Image (cartoon, rainbow, N blue to C red):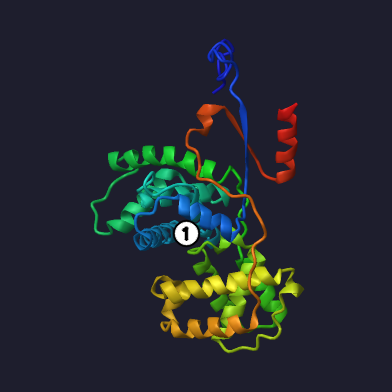
Amino acid sequence: MAANASTPRSGSPSTNPQGPLPAMIQLSRPYLTQNQIWTLEQNVAHTNGSRDQQLKFQAFSVILATGSYLRFPIRTMGTAMVLFQRFYLFNSMQDFPSTLDTAHACLFVASKTEDTLKKLKEILLASYYIKHPSGPDISMDSPIIEDQRRRLISLERHVLETMSFDFRVRHPQPYIIKFAKRLRYPMPLAETAWQIALDSYRTLVPLKCTPHAIALGCLYIAASLLEVNLSDIKPEQFCVRPLEFENVVLELLAFYIDWLPQTTLFATYTDPSKFMSMRIELNKRLGKYTEPRAPALKLRDYTMGDKGTVRYVLNWERERIEREIDMH
């Protein structure tokens, strides 16, 4: 609804005796370096790392179960999991302790991002029936659903601000299909790589690496598991930097070694020693991943909007132009 013409603008001299509030620029960072992630993890107050990880796995299960119930495509559920991972890099679990509420909010935002929109009440109702399959039945007008909806509307804003209103999320699955055809890999291998790509959403890999690098790493692990010739996988031929490829493979292997029972692949491969052997063999052949220098990041400031106007920009060149304009 448009503001009344006589209503003073926020930050104008009539409402702020000290003059207009300054404008702040927030640059979107779709990809982070490992050093930036380490810094953010150290800044977030984690009371129990293992417990926090278990809470994240529970939230991922809720996202997958609710998304499947609503027949969301994989890309919507994957986007929700990526948003969830990003949210708790820039926000503390002490400030947002209800990871299930955050999971529902991320799924709601993801449904908009991926153009598979559902009403928030529909998502909450689906989650309720998954949690209470034997009833009692409730409607979307239930006070239980309405109370949750009000909480999540506020939480949705925090999710949007954390992602800097950047709705660009890319997924590795299309590249897995294209690369598997290019390498003439059999269908079972592509299906295994697809499962590995689903597990990648449970890690921070999508926040650090491009989707085609993730796809190639998933195919590499799948080919190793199925003992298929790996000599055809040359990262440069798929526009993937070798160092980025190494990072994807090693991080996914570490995830399987530490958390195999929590993964999709556990239904087929139950022995983590297989992944340990792969990592040992891989470390003998691959170089060491070195991080480029990148600016350190801080946790999100919840009061930023109270200090002035926040402008969200999507690329560094635009950020530079905006700052030059502000300086003049």
* Image height of 80 relative to 181, above or below: above
Please identify the quadrant where the N terminus is shown.
Answer: top right
Please identify the quadrant where the C terminus is shown.
Answer: top right
Q: Residues within 10 Å of mark 1 (few under 14, many from 20)?
A: few
* Image height of 287 relative to 311, above or below: below
Task: Give the residue at x 73% y 72%.
Answer: 238
Judge whether residue 180 can be spotted in this image.
yes
In which quarter of the view is residue 67 placed?
Answer: bottom left
Of residue 264 and residue 17, the one placed in the foreground of this image is: 17
In which quarter of the view is residue 13 placed?
Answer: top right
**Residue 295 locus on image (x, y percent):** 63, 50
Task: Give the residue at x 40% y 42%.
Answer: 152
Task: Give the residue at x 36% y 47%.
Answer: 94
* Image height of 181 relative to 25, above or below: below
Left or right of residue 289: residue 154: left
**Residue 63 locus on image (x, y percent):** 43, 57
**Residue 181 locus on image (x, y percent):** 69, 78
Of residue 168 and residue 161, the one placed in the foreground of this image is: 161
**Residue 197 locus on image (x, y percent):** 55, 69
Left or right of residue 288: residue 258: left
The image shows a total of numbered marks equal to 1
Task: Give the residue at x 74% y 68%.
Answer: 239
In which quarter of the view is residue 146 placed?
Answer: top left
- Where is mark 1, residue-wise? 71
Judge whether residue 83 can be spotted in this image.
no
Instruction: Tell me the SS state at disc 1.
Output: loop
Q: Amino acid at mark 1?
A: Arg
